[in-house]
Image (cartoon, rainbow, N blue to C red):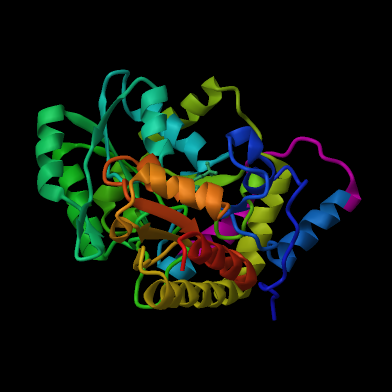
Amino acid sequence: MYDFDKIIDRRGTHSLKYDFAPRRGKPDDILPFWVADMDFASPPAVLDALSQRVRHGVFGYSDNADEGYYNAISRWYEKRFGWKTRPEWLVKTPGVVYAICTAIRTLTRPGDAVLFQQPVYYPFEGSVRINDRRPVVNPLIYEDGRYRMDLELMERQIKDEQVKLFILCSPHNPVSRVWTKEELAAVGRLCARYGVYVIADEIHGDFVFPGHTHHVFASLDPDFAELCILCTAPTKTFNLAGLQISNIFIPNEKIRHAFIREIKRTGYSQPNVMGLLACQAAYEQGEEWLDELLKYLSGNLSLLRSFLDERFPYASLVEPEGTYLAWLDFHASGLSDQELNDILLNKARLWLDEGAMFGAGGEGFQRINFACPKSLLIEGLERMEKAFGR
Ligand SMILES: Cc1ncc(COP(=O)(O)O)c(C=O)c1O
């Protein structure tokens, strides 16, 4: 019903993925599989809502207090994740990274220790550093091709480093784990016991493969809800990142007021009206589109898996449980990161995200974004096969 096979030319559209290669030191003819946006058009209902507004022609200020907007999001979270929210918990920001930076300043002081689990989405560390807080890295454990949390080390770090805040990535980018209820409960209990606040970045929560379930951190225990700033957004799910809208839920009233005050200090007030419209339309009418998309992505994942199993002995797949990002283990290739990047970039002319960017434990890995038409993915994989000389 939806045509995810259709190739949409994104060049010349101010696309970070397609239009900035030379400016970022990459060859111009490179095929990009790096940044986490998709090569698919957003759901038709979103396009209709935006077109209607364009035809209306007036783009004056919007405001925050719209019941329809909140209802669309709250219904989504209740239906898909069994999480009941309250209207007053919701704070809108232009992005999740903006919210993470704001949350760091809200919950900690300069010099305070902030913990996160690497390898992880690199702006976590960047957000901690740019706000003059102290990063504490808790490496994930990689065993038998799967990642798990190191809670024993985390407890020692919380005590020894006096950690004030933990940034959770759930589902986890780039290792694509969908944390189980038990794992989330264990990490939540640890934070609650030591009074550590939690930023739960759940931007990838809608991308979960069969056999796995995403659990909203705040829904697991009222104590977790009280200590967390929960970051959600329609931007990954419906491919709206350029519209800059995210929905941050903060059940704890004191924290929420402090967070809003911190937002005001940056001078940000009314959200982008196109982002609001797109978000509401997506949550109200985009469910069927998303369910179709998830099937399509499962197909791409099967393709990637068979390619690696049958035709490409240089890398193995860390089986993704969620997200549309696959973490490829290139250790079998015996190549250094430099050699690997050189082959991928200059020979295959592919732009992946190199593992080392994601911090400790990322060496020898590459992250590939497989949210694109199947034919593009095939072209990328064939380029890779050819460049490695088979
Ligand atoms: C875990 C995670 N958080 C946040 C973001 C970006 O969010 P935003 O564009 O809303 O700042 C990304 C994008 O890749 C992500 O993977």
Q: Nearer the viewer, residue 350 or 139?
A: 350
In the depicted structure, whether residue 160 falls above or below residue 368:
above
Total number of numbered discs in the rendering: 0
In the depicted structure, whether residue 80 falls above or below residue 160:
below
Residue 68 pos. (x, y %): 65, 56
**The image quarter in which residue 124 lies:** top left
* Residue 329 drawn in magenta: no
Residue 165 pos. (x, y %): 27, 35
x 43%, y 37%: residue? 123
**The image quarter in which residue 84 lies:** bottom left
Residue 355 pos. (x, y %): 38, 47
**The image quarter in which residue 326 lies:** bottom left
Q: Which residue lies furthest to the front in this view?
A: 389
x 40%, y 46%: residue? 339
* Residue 63 drawn in magenta: yes
Q: Can residue 370 be seen in this view?
A: no
x 22%, y 37%: residue? 196
x 63%, y 53%: residue? 69
Q: Indicate the quadrant containing the N terminus: top left, top right, bottom left or bottom right.
A: bottom right
In the picture, measured across the screen, residue 169 lies left or right of residue 382, that is: left
In the depicted structure, whether residue 97 falls above or below residue 29:
above
Q: Nearer the viewer, residue 52 or 370?
A: 370
Q: Is residue 129 visible?
A: yes
Q: Which of 366 and 72 is in front in this view?
A: 366
Magenta region:
55-77
